[in-house]
């Protein structure tokens, strides 16, 4: 099991930026793809971004494509989500999660370990 802790959330103005971090302890992240998800009030948790084990492949939801980037530092056991050009609709709790080994996909059910989440609020 991997213990994940997100940080970096907070209040930002529309058009601004935030950088989220997801630090892992316990088992290392090197052998796992990682994902970021978010959940807004009254809505289901939705996929935001995914990064492969090596970091060479990344995938994004259409709603954040071109504005968000995902990266990882396996030596530090940390995954990042850089969020630029923030919009009010980006307001949500953001979660990082470890992908199930050997399984590719964007559904939350394909991710096994989750952090506690970090709140991102974007004011317009």
Image (tube, grey):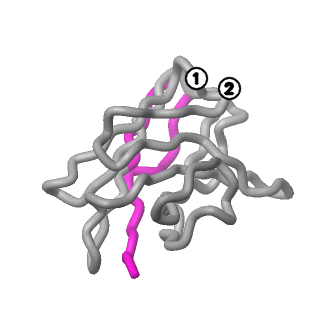
Magenta span main SS: strand
Which percent across, then down, holds residue 115? 48, 69
Mark 1 element type: loop
Q: Which residues are magenta?
A: 1-20
Q: Residue furthest left?
A: 75
Locate residue 30, reporting x and y percent.
26, 58
Q: Nearer the viewer, residue 63 or 57?
A: 57
Quarter of the image for residue 2 reads bottom left
Label disc, if present, on residue 30 of the rendered structure:
none
- The residue drawn where x is 73% and y is 56% is 45
Element at badge 2?
loop
Measuring from the top left, give residue 16's x and y in whole percent. Answer: 48, 25
CA gap between label 1 and label 2 equals 5 Å
Image coords of residue 12 (percent x, y): 51, 36
Q: Residue at x 28, y 76 (%)?
A: 27
Q: Quadrant of the C terminus?
A: top right
Are there few (<14), some (14-19), or many (20+) residues within 10 Å of tag 2?
few
Residue sticking out furthest to the front: 102
**Residue 75 vertical placement versus 47 (above, below):** below
Q: Which residue is at the far right?
A: 42
Residue 62 badge: 2
Asked if 123 appears above or below 25 in the picture, the reply is above
Residue lying at 50% horizontally and 73% vertically, measured from the top left: 113
Q: Is residue 17 magenta?
A: yes
- 108 vs 53, left or right, is right
Residue 60 magenta-drawn? no
Whether residues under marks 1 and 2 lie with C-beta atoms below 8 angstroms apart, the answer is yes
Q: Residue at x 61, y 28 (%)?
A: 64
Image quarter where the N terminus lies is: bottom left
Please name the residue that numbered disc 1 is placed on.
Answer: 65
């Amino acid at each position: 099991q991997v213990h994940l802790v997100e940080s970096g959330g907070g209040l930002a103005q529309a058009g601004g930026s935030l950088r989220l971090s997801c630090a892992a302890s316990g088992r290392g992240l090197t052998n796992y793809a990682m994902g970021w998800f978010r959940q807004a009030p009254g809505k289901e948790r939705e996929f935001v971004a995914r990064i492969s084990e090596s970091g060479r492949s990344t995938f994004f939801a259409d709603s954040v494509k071109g504005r968000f980037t995902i990266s990882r530092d396996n030596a530090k056991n940390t995954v990042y989500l850089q969020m630029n050009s923030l919009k009010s609709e980006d307001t949500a709790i953001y979660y990082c999660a470890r992908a199930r080994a050997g399984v590719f996909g964007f559904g939350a059910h394909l991710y096994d370990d989750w952090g506690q989440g970090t709140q991102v609020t974007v004011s317009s």
